[in-house]
């Protein structure tokens, strides 16, 4: 193809020229072409960009091919064509030579790995959120970004900022019970919101209509989240409630909600689905909840279109699933991925013991959630059965990392591969700054993005800081094997030669918080455990953190006994010490191994940052600094947690052996971690505000500088304890035990090919091969987090191993999940297979589906 042409033309079949989102994508590509100095012309000398239908392709798939006649975009339906056209626009915008890049564009068609690639944006504060909510310019730029990155679902969550059955003294309840803030419902003229006039209500409805219309124009499914269905908080009084709702008694809420929902869907015809929080935290007592939701969801009927009903999974039971079926909608259940946090891409092999089902206790407010269906709170529970008639969409909650950028391609590719576990449809990411300013904390004058360095603040465009994160999320959920060029080109355009080292720094730094979250899991609640700005829990004297974590820990509630979010794969400090002393290791990943990995991540992030700064065209540019500062802070957090974890192990060993020397070494590690935290505070000085507020509890706000004093107090107490034991006795010699500590993640030693399937109700034989001297135990269960694991020793004949899962354990219509525990008979070392790879992005167990004979 000649590259002397600098003009292009579009050849669009009439079938698609007016089919959303093709017109948007064409306009987007044309704008990119013009912005880069090329031209659009209908003349015969211009290079054609042609759309050709290929019915053999799957939905959302597209192909790009440069031919002698021009560029050909193939797809089977409008969204696929739009992805192809917007990919060309992205290439043009980011290429050094846009026309040459355009004429060589190639992409083989691929079916999306995850059918649902979503983000959730929460309205949490009238002070911080009304501006962007009502701003058409915000929605235009933001939705453009999502569409280009192939994010195909946006969830606007209203009422998520409060738990009406937990949170006392509710204040900023704007859009919490959303309907009267948006519509005046015929026949309910008496319902009003004090402080919200007709003009406010009209502007809110216009904003919602605009956002949903513009999402649809770009081919994005618009999901409206209605997370609260009570007009007033359940707990006590809220004398400073800013927007009281009058004229609606509690007993009339279901009927009013049904009528309001029906009107709202008519006023906003581009709303494609509704998410409901159906358990008690949405203000609805769980006793007789079926009748309440049957009335509310009746408002979905007669919408004139197929709607999605997405029920937040916590507390969902068979009755609620039936209620959703009855309205004729497409039903989905949305479990949390890693409790209320951002974790690794795989799903917990086991929820914490605290999440096990309990006998019902007659609690009419929360009995289902807190007791008989307790295991649905923080994972997929029992929702992945093979014969279900509803879909599952996972939700990645924002407890771990709320404002520092999270941008590791390996982890996001892992989400693309593993968010479809058990036939689930994918995942929805609670985006950065979710809950910012929640619970009336957005009134201190600090911008929504938390920057006090005005050169870094982006105002209503705060999402632009996270454009690289959106790019990774959407594109790697779509294609986990995508070439790195698809994300590096945006960094190259902005940062030139610094792109690769900056991406490497962000990758290493992006692994830190997910690894910390799943291993140092002090609370499943995002309201209390926030590792990004960590409220310290003391190690010394086996103290308990009564004010912050105690309610969410099993007895004795100490640092050394706090369960990881996945107790099948990761080990507590006390259990690790016990295994060292007894010579009977569990094989789980140890705290020492986690600390070692964190230090390696810190080192690699810092080295890559040095290289990025040295090669950046302008290392002082706001765009570079936003990313580099966050990566540097995350590396320092890795060093802090590594020191804290090592100190915790030392204390557990000291408690088990009495060896003061072990404790002395741990104290040194803790001091190193503390020094890293002090450097973090200095690095962040003048960058971020003094109150990083995402809620009204001490653990939801404050600053790293507040936490340093907590760490210093713990270190001082450990030092006093060390001094006391040194004065009183030389202690026992635990050096032999301490020498067995290892930081190596051992893998391999077993060859195994998972079966393609098994037959329900028949024994399932699992076979493998291992070298002599290795004993192997099979751990298995259904893909059901409400169950315990079965442990079966594998029989050996030479190098061949086998174990049988009994027929009684294969009857239930669930896939089987299993892994292996290996032990070296000579060294007594133990480890798990498959285990976690260095990327932290694989699935450390196998899953096999069943069928009926």
Image (cartoon, helix red, strand yellow):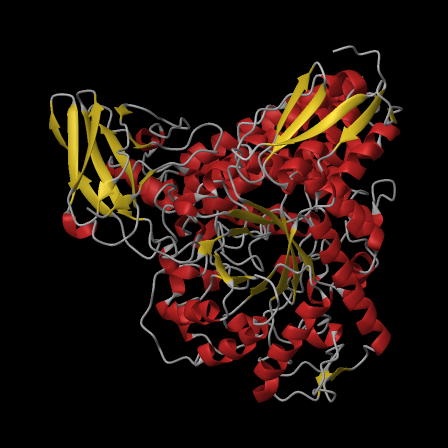
Q: Is residue 171 left or right of residue 584?
A: right
**The N terminus - image quarter:** top right
Q: Residue at x 67, y 25 (%)?
A: 72
Q: Residue at x 61, y 40 (%)?
A: 77
Q: Residue at x 71, y 81 (%)?
A: 185
Where is residue 487, by image quadrant? top right
User: Residue 11: x percent and y percent?
Assistant: 75, 30
Q: Is residue 422 left or right of residue 495?
A: left
User: Residue 446: x percent and y percent?
Assistant: 81, 55
Where is residue 653, by image quadrant? top left
User: Residue 603: x percent and y percent?
Assistant: 59, 25
Q: Nearer the viewer, residue 730 or 819?
A: 819
Q: Nearer the viewer, residue 830 or 194?
A: 194
Residue 154 appearing in the image: yes
Residue 443 appearing in the image: no
User: Residue 527: x percent and y percent?
Assistant: 58, 60
């Amino acid at each position: 193809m000649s590259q002397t042409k600098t003009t292009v033309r579009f050849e669009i079949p009439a079938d698609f020229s007016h089919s959303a989102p093709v017109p948007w994508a064409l306009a987007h590509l044309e704008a990119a072409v013009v912005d880069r100095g090329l031209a659009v012309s209908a003349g015969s000398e211009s290079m054609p960009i042609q759309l050709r239908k290929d019915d053999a392709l799957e939905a959302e798939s597209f192909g790009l091919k440069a031919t002698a006649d021009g560029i050909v975009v193939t797809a089977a339906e409008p969204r696929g064509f739009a992805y192809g056209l917007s990919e060309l626009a992205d290439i043009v915008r980011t290429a050094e030579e846009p026309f040459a890049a355009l004429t060589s564009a190639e992409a083989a068609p691929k079916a999306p790995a995850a059918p649902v690639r979503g983000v959730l944006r929460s309205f949490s504060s009238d002070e911080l959120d009304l501006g962007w909510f009502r701003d058409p310019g915000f929605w235009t730029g933001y939705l453009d970004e999502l569409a280009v990155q192939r994010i195909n679902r946006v969830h606007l969550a209203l009422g998520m900022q409060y738990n009406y059955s937990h949170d006392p003294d509710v204040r900023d309840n704007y859009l919490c019970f959303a309907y009267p803030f948006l519509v005046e419902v015929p026949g309910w003229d008496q319902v009003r919101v004090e402080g919200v006039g007709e003009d406010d209500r009209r502007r809110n409805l216009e904003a919602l209509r605009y956002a949903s219309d513009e999402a649809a124009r770009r081919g994005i499914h618009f999901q409206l989240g209605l997370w609260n269905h009570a007009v007033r908080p359940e707990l006590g009084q809220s004398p400073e409630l800013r927007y009281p709702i009058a004229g609606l008694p509690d007993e009339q809420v279901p009927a009013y909600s049904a009528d309001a929902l029906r009107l709202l869907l008519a006023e906003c015809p581009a709303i494609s689905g509704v998410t409901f929080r159906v358990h008690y935290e949405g203000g609805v007592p769980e006793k007789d909840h079926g009748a309440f939701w049957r009335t509310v969801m009746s408002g979905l009927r007669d919408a004139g279109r197929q709607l999605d009903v997405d029920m937040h999974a916590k507390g969902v039971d068979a009755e609620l699933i039936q209620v959703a079926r009855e309205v004729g909608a497409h039903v989905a259940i949305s479990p949390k991925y890693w409790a209320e946090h951002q974790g690794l891409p795989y799903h917990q092999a086991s929820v914490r013991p605290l999440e096990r089902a309990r006998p019902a206790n007659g609690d009419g407010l929360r009995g289902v959630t807190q007791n008989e269906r307790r295991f649905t709170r923080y994972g997929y529970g029992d929702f992945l059965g093979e014969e279900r008639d509803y879909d599952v969409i996972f939700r990645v909650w924002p407890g771990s990392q709320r404002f520092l950028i999270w941008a590791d391609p390996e982890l996001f590719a892992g989400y693309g591969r593993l968010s479809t576990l058990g036939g689930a449809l994918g995942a929805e990411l609670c985006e950065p700054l979710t809950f910012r300013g929640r619970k009336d904390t957005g009134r201190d004058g600090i911008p929504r993005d938390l920057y006090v360095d005005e050169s870094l603040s982006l105002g209503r465009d705060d999402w632009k800081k996270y454009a690289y994160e959106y790019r990774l999320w959407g594109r790697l959920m779509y294609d986990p094997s995508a070439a790195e060029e698809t994300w590096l080109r945006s960094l190259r355009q902005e940062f030139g030669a610094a792109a690769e080292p900056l991406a490497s720094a962000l990758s290493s730094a992006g692994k830190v918080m997910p690894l910390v979250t799943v291993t140092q899991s002090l609370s499943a609640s995002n309201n209390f455990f926030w590792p990004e700005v960590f409220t310290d829990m003391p190690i010394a004297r086996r103290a308990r953190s009564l004010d912050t974590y105690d309610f969410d820990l099993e007895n004795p509630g100490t640092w050394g006994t706090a369960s990881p979010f996945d107790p099948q794969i990761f080990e507590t400090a006390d259990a690790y010490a016990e295994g060292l002393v007894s010579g009977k290791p569990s094989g789980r990943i140890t705290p020492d191994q986690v600390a070692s990995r964190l230090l390696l991540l810190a080192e690699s992030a810092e080295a890559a940052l040095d290289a990025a700064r040295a090669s950046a065209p302008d290392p002082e540019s706001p765009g570079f600094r936003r990313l580099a500062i966050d990566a540097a802070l995350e590396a320092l957090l890795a060093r802090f947690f590594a020191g804290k974890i090592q100190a915790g192990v030392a204390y557990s060993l000291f408690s088990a052996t009495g060896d003061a020397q072990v404790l002395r070494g741990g104290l040194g590690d803790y001091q190193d971690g503390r020094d890293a935290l002090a450097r973090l505070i200095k690095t962040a000085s003048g960058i971020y505000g003094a109150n990083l507020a995402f809620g009204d509890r001490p653990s939801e706000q404050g600053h790293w500088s507040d936490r340093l004093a907590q760490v210093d107090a713990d270190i001082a107490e450990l030092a006093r304890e060390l001094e006391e034991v040194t004065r009183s006795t030389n202690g026992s010699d635990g050096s032999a035990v301490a020498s067995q500590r290892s930081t190596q993640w051992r893998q391999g030693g077993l060859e195994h090919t998972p079966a393609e399937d098994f037959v329900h109700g028949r024994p399932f034989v699992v076979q493998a091969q291992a070298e002599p001297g290795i004993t192997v135990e099979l751990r298995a269960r259904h893909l059901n987090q409400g169950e315990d694991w079965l442990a079966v020793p594998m029989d050996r004949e030479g190098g061949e191993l086998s174990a049988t899962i009994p027929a009684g354990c294969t009857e239930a219509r669930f896939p089987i999940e299993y892994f292996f525990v290996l032990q070296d008979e000579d060294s007594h070392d133990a480890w798990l297979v498959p285990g976690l790879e260095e990327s932290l992005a694989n699935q450390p167990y196998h899953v096999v589906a069943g069928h009926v004979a």
